[in-house]
Amino acid sequence: MGDGSVLRVFAFRPVGSETALDALLRDDLMPPFLELPGLVDALVGRHNEGAGDERIVASVWESREAMTGDLGEASLVAPFQLEQAGSIQDGRLEVLPVAVSVRVTAAAAPTILRVFRGRVQEGQLDSYVRQAHDGALADADASTGLVALYLGIERPDRFLTVSAWMHWDAIERATGGDVHHPIATRHSERLITATAEHYEILPSTARPTAELQPSKAAG
């Protein structure tokens, strides 16, 4: 993946039936979305019952230009088309340059999507990125259950990490947290603020088949 790759995170809530929206995403919207030529990876998550009804589509693109060119007029709501925007509400879009990317050939599909946002202490972003990169590679090499990890940055101090995991045990081993302490993470001494959200990966959703090599951390 080139240095110009970007992470796009689109969060939203359904208007009306959650089941109908999930079926629309899985069966009608994601298949053509996954065929877009500039797309590298994509993951769809939903909050579990009782945790709210937010959905999230996290995607990685070869470049910002490839993303905007492929999505066209629907760039603010994709994978939805403009005429389908009435089926969602409370949309929030984030697009950040990718500093770390790791994708693992896994025996099983991921089931949990973790979205970790934070701010680092002054002057600590590059060091945090390097440590996150090394930790992700170690998790991948150890076959801990990590399937993919993408870290985007907004200088001078903000980052957003999206990672996909096969099971909770893998997240607990990698972060030191658990379901009762989900915000735990490595290298917390560098952080000022941090939040973590966990989603169930929408069952039976596909991903692009492109093979990725682990990236080097941006410095």
Image (cartoon, rainbow, N blue to C red):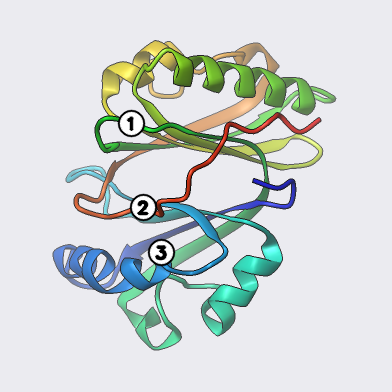
The quadrant holding residue 79 is bottom left
Q: Are marks 1 and 3 in contact (CB under 8 Å)?
A: no
Q: Which mark is residue 182?
A: none
Q: Are marks 2 and 3 in contact (CB under 8 Å)?
A: yes
x and y percentages locating residue 102 in the rendered image: 53, 33
> For the residue labelled by badge 1, is the local secondary structure a helix, a strand or a loop?
loop
Q: Quadrant of the N terminus?
A: top right
- In the image, taking residue 122 as reference, residue 7 lies left or right, namely left
Question: Which residue carries the number 1 mark?
Answer: 106
x and y percentages locating residue 143 in the rendered image: 38, 17
> For the residue labelled by badge 2, is the local secondary structure a helix, a strand or a loop?
loop
Please state which amino acid type lies under the numbered disc 3: Leu
92 versus 43 height, above or below: below
- The answer to whether any part of residue 15 appears in the image is yes
Question: Which residue carries the number 3 mark?
Answer: 34
> For the residue labelled by badge 3, is the local secondary structure a helix, a strand or a loop?
helix
What residue is at 50 percent from the left and 32 percent from the top? 195
Please state which amino acid type lies under the numbered disc 2: Arg
What residue is at 27 percent from the left and 49 percent from the top? 52
Query: How dense is the environment of label 2, judged by Cα within 10 Å: few (below 14), some, or many (20 and up)?
Result: some
What residue is at 22 percent from the left and 43 percent from the top? 48
89 versus 166 height, above or below: below
Q: Nearer the viewer, residue 96 or 98?
A: 98
The quadrant holding residue 101 is top right
**Sequence-first disc among 1 and 3:** 3
Q: Which mark is residue 207?
A: 2
46 versus 215 height, above or below: below
Q: Are marks 1 and 2 in contact (CB under 8 Å)?
A: no
